[in-house]
Amino acid sequence: MSTVTFRVTDEEKAFIQSMADLNGLSLSELARTKLLEILEDQIDMALYEKAMKAHEVKDESISHQDMLKELDL
């Protein structure tokens, strides 16, 4: 396992430690999980934006009524 170090002020460390305590996590576990969550959310948003741009270029959506007709419902 690797170690990553970053600098924070004393106030920031106290805040992060209090949030870790509040969540029942170690400072390391809180930092790791929150950082990974944020980065995964960023990837999700980038993929969403790419998909929406592709949809705008080639919109193949149909109305609910047309879908019912197509499915013979």
Image (cartoon, grey):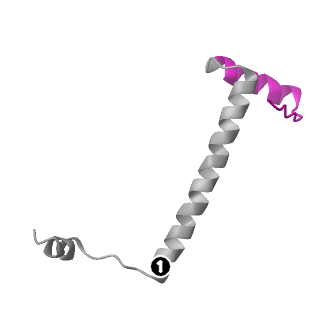
On screen, residue 50 versus residue 13, left or right, reads: left
Which image quadrant is residue 67 in? bottom left
On screen, residue 7 versus residue 60, left or right, reads: right
Residue drawn at (50%, 70%) of the image? 52
Q: Which residue was labeled with disc 1? A: 56
| Image location (x, y in percent) of residue 72 | 11, 72
Residue drawn at (67%, 40%) of the image? 36
Q: Residue furthest bottom?
A: 57
Which image quadrant is residue 29 in? top right
| Image location (x, y in percent) of residue 73 | 10, 68
Which image quadrant is residue 46 in? bottom right
Q: Residue furthest front?
A: 1
Identify the secondary structure beneath mark 1: helix
Magenta region, residue range: 1-21
| Image location (x, y in percent) of residue 4 | 85, 34
Residue drawn at (84%, 31%) of the image? 3
Q: Nearer the viewer, residue 18 or 38?
A: 38
> In the displayed structure, would residue 43 be above or below residue 25?
below
| Image location (x, y in percent) of residue 15 | 75, 26
Q: Nearer the viewer, residue 8 or 61?
A: 61
On screen, residue 34 versus residue 55, left or right, reads: right
Q: How many numbered marks are there?
A: 1
